[in-house]
Image (cartoon, grey):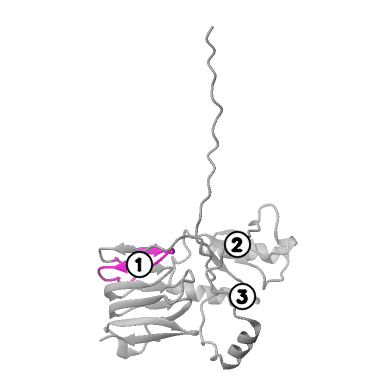
C-alpha cells in the first residue's frame, strides 16, 4: 500500500528595507497644519503613496485631538504607517503602531560644546520653512536615469540616490531624489533633492525656470528666486539653512 504524504505549507518570510518620511508635528497644531498646507500647495503629490512615520516627541495632546490630527492628515492623503516617541495614551487598537530601530538619514548631532558654539553663530531662521521632514534611509544608494523629458503631471521619485534626466522637467511635473538631481534641459516644474538626508545633495540644470527648487527641506519658489538666474545654467546647494544658487555660465 502506497501512502501519499502531503508536504506542509511553506511560510514565505523575508525582510524588506524601505525609506520612510518622518513628520514631526508641533503645537499649536493649527499653525503646523497651515505650514504643511503651504508645502502641499507647491507640491500636492509629494507624500502620495509614501510611507509616513509621525514623531510625537513634541506633542502632548489628548487622544481625541490626536485622532482628529490623524483624520486631518488622511484628508491630505497622508497615511501614517507608525509613530515614534508616543506616550501610552496615543498607542492602541485602531491607532498607528509604535515603531523603532530606523536609521536616521540625518547626520549625527555634534558634541554639546560644538552645538553651543554653532548656536551663537547660527544665522536667523528663514522667514518661511518647510514642515520638518526627517527621512529614514535604510536602502542602498543608486542612480535613476530618465532618458526622456518629464511631462506635466508626472512624478519621478528615487529616494535611494540621485536622478539624472536627459530632457526638460515640464511645468506641473515633479522630481524627488534622496541625493542630487541632474537635469540636462530646462527645469520648469518642481525639483526636490537631498530628501533622504544624503549629504552634499545638489540640483544642476542647464536652464532654470523652476516653479520650486528644494534641497534638504529649504526651498525657493519662482517668486523668491533671483531673476538673474532665470534661464541660466545653475547649481543649487544647501549652505547651513539657506539655498545658494550659483550660475554656471
Judged from this view, the residue extending furthest toward the top is 1
Mark 2 vs mark 1, CA separation in Å: 34 Å
| Residue 177 tag number | none
Disc 2 packing (10 Å; few <14; some 14–19; many ≥20): some
Disc 1 packing (10 Å; few <14; some 14–19; many ≥20): many
Does residue 168 show up magenta in the picture? yes
Q: Secondary structure at mark 2?
A: helix
* Left or right of residue 158, residue 97 in this image: right
Q: Nearer the viewer, mark 2 or mark 1?
A: 1
Residue displayed at 30% across by 72% down? 183
Q: Is residue 92 above or below residue 47?
A: above
Residue 110 in view in this figure: yes
Pick whichever, 19 or 40, lies toward us: 19
Residue 54 on image: x %, y %: 60, 65
Mark 3 vs mark 2, CA separation in Å: 14 Å
Mark 3 vs mark 1, CA separation in Å: 35 Å
Residue displayed at 37% across by 82% down? 222
| Residue 71 tag number | 2
- For the stretch drawn in magenta, what is the main secondary structure? loop
Mark 3 sits on what residue? 30
Q: Secondary structure at mark 3?
A: helix
Q: Is residue 150 above or below residue 237?
A: above
* Left or right of residue 12, residue 149 in this image: left
Pick whichever, 64 or 246, lies toward us: 246
Does residue 106 show up magenta in the picture? no
Earlier-in-chain disc, 3 versus 1: 3
Q: Which residues are magenta?
A: 150-173
Amino acid at each position: 500500500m502506497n501512502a501519499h504524504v502531503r508536504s506542509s505549507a511553506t511560510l514565505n518570510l523575508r525582510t524588506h528595507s524601505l525609506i520612510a518620511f518622518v513628520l514631526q508635528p508641533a503645537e499649536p497644531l493649527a499653525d503646523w497644519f497651515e505650514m504643511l498646507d503651504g508645502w502641499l500647495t507647491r507640491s500636492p503629490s509629494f507624500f502620495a503613496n509614501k510611507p509616513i512615520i509621525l514623531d510625537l516627541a513634541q506633542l502632548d495632546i489628548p487622544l481625541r485631538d490626536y485622532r482628529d490630527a490623524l483624520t486631518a492628515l488622511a484628508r491630505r492623503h497622508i497615511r501614517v504607517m507608525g509613530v515614534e516617541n508616543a506616550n501610552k495614551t496615543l498607542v492602541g487598537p485602531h491607532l498607528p503602531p509604535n515603531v523603532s530601530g530606523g536609521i536616521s538619514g540625518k547626520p549625527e548631532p555634534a558634541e554639546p560644546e560644538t552645538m553651543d558654539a554653532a548656536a551663537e553663530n547660527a544665522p536667523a531662521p528663514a522667514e518661511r520653512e518647510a514642515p520638518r521632514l526627517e527621512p529614514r534611509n535604510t536602502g542602498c544608494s543608486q542612480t535613476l536615469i530618465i532618458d526622456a523629458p518629464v511631462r506635466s503631471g508626472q512624478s519621478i521619485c528615487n529616494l535611494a540616490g540621485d536622478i539624472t534626466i536627459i530632457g526638460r522637467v515640464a511645468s506641473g511635473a515633479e522630481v524627488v531624489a534622496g541625493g542630487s538631481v541632474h537635469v540636462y534641459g530646462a527645469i520648469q516644474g518642481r525639483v526636490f533633492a537631498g530628501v533622504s538626508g544624503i549629504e552634499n545633495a545638489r540640483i544642476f540644470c542647464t536652464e532654470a525656470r523652476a516653479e520650486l527648487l528644494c534641497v534638504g527641506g529649504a526651498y525657493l519658489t519662482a517668486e523668491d528666486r533671483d531673476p538673474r538666474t532665470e534661464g541660466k545654467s545653475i547649481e543649487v546647494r544647501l549652505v547651513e539653512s539657506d539655498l545658494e544658487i550659483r550660475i554656471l555660465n
